[in-house]
Image (spheres, helix red, strand yellow):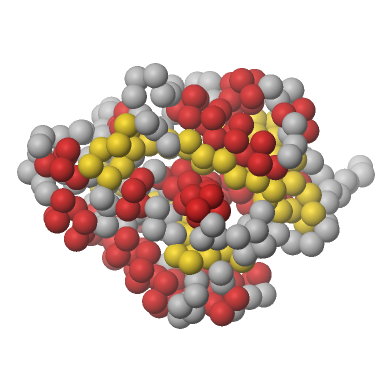
């Protein structure tokens, strides 16, 4: 038996995103439930979020984000041979959506699969795609994080409705001579599997917010430190910090504990986009690049974490 090897390394060559048209402010929510703008911003830092309409399906949003990522990368759909969709909110159990998304984008017969690792899903998918390229299983991959969380939350429950939102973010991953995607540090704490869940037989999500907050703020800084160590960088080398957009207080506390320099750009996409689970990291990165706050060649520290409970940290070079 012979084995194949692929590119020496992998890198991200382009981002794309899609945000639903409907903006939902905190004042909008206060009109239908016992909450207020001050209450929401003081606890999670969200000012508004995007909710998808009936004509904005998970497939539609993912296709839109994937198409933009392809355009940014300079590749054609025919160049892609692997499509991975990270999502926690597929409308049906079977079939997965990645193959359909690839078809709608015009990608001919790629490897295609969906991946559910909670809010860490896109970081899991990114690392899986990079590994496939390095081993020769793929040449170019499209990695999408897409969610329609409003299908699975009680829109009258302030414990979840004020937090979760919809959207899709994507990146094209290609081969490279020098590393642009560092080793992933991933894992899980399954003893907390019920902290974020859609209980069996139910449609809407439940979340033990305080338990997740304590876990994220006490356990995950070490994951980020290990990811930097494996990539051979220090906090002083980090230009951009883009963790999962779950809670603004968690984001800022992590940045402080890591000792990141004042010049580091910190993603705060949660303020305008809410928590979009698997989509949050690529959405945040694309927004920073589009605004000019982040630049091509910047070193970014990423972290996904959420239902499972799962986590994945890695260092990447921005396209």
Describe residue 75's horizontal placement relative to residue 6 as left or right: left
Could one spot residue 217 in this view of the protein? yes
Task: Return the residue nearer the eye: 25 or 57.
Answer: 25
Task: Tell me where residue 227 sits by quadrant.
Answer: bottom right
The residue depicted at 40 percent of the width and 77 percent of the height is 257
Residue 21 placement (x, y as % from top left): 37, 31
The residue depicted at 11 percent of the width and 42 percent of the height is 30
Q: Quadrant of the N terminus?
A: top right
Could one spot residue 85 in this view of the protein? no
The residue depicted at 79 percent of the width and 62 percent of the height is 178
Residue 227, above or below 63: below
Q: Quadrant of the C terminus?
A: bottom right
Task: Return the residue nearer the eye: 135 or 69.
Answer: 69
Describe residue 152's horizontal placement relative to residue 309 as left or right: left
Describe residue 209's horizontal placement relative to residue 239 as left or right: left
Task: Tell me where residue 28 sits by quadrant.
Answer: top left
Task: Please count the marks in the image.
Answer: 0
Residue 238 placement (x, y as % from top left): 56, 72
The residue depicted at 70 percent of the width and 35 percent of the height is 82
């Amino acid at each position: 038996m012979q084995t194949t090897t692929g590119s020496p390394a992998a890198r991200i060559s382009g981002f794309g995103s899609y945000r639903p048209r409907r903006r939902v402010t905190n004042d909008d929510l206060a009109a239908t439930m016992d909450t207020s703008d001050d209450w929401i911003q003081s606890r999670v830092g969200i000012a508004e979020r995007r909710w998808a309409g009936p004509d904005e399906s998970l497939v539609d949003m993912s296709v839109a984000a994937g198409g933009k990522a392809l355009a940014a990368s300079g590749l054609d759909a025919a160049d892609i041979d692997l499509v991975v969709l990270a999502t926690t909110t597929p409308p049906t159990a079977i079939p997965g959506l990645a193959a359909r998304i690839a078809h709608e984008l015009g990608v001919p017969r790629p490897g295609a699969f969906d991946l559910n690792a909670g809010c860490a899903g896109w970081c899991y998918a990114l690392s899986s795609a990079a590994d496939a390229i390095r081993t020769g299983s793929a040449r170019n991959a499209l990695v999408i994080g897409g969610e329609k969380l409003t299908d699975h939350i009680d829109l009258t429950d302030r414990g979840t409705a004020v937090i979760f939102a919809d959207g899709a973010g994507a990146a094209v991953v290609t081969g490279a001579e020098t590393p642009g995607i560092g080793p992933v540090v991933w894992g899980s704490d399954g003893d907390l599997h019920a902290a974020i869940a859609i209980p069996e037989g139910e449609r809407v999500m439940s979340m033990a917010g305080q338990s997740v907050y304590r876990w994220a703020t006490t356990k995950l800084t070490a994951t980020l430190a290990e990811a930097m160590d494996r990539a051979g960088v220090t906090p002083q080398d980090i230009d951009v910090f883009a963790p999962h957009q779950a809670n603004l207080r968690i984001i800022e506390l992590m940045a402080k504990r890591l000792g990141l320099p004042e010049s580091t750009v910190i993603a705060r996409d949660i303020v305008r986009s809410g928590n979009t689970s698997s989509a949050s990291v690529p959405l945040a990165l694309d927004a920073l690049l589009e605004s000019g706050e982040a630049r091509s060649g910047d070193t970014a520290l990423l972290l996904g974490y959420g239902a499972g409970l799962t986590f994945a940290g890695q260092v990447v070079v921005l396209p």
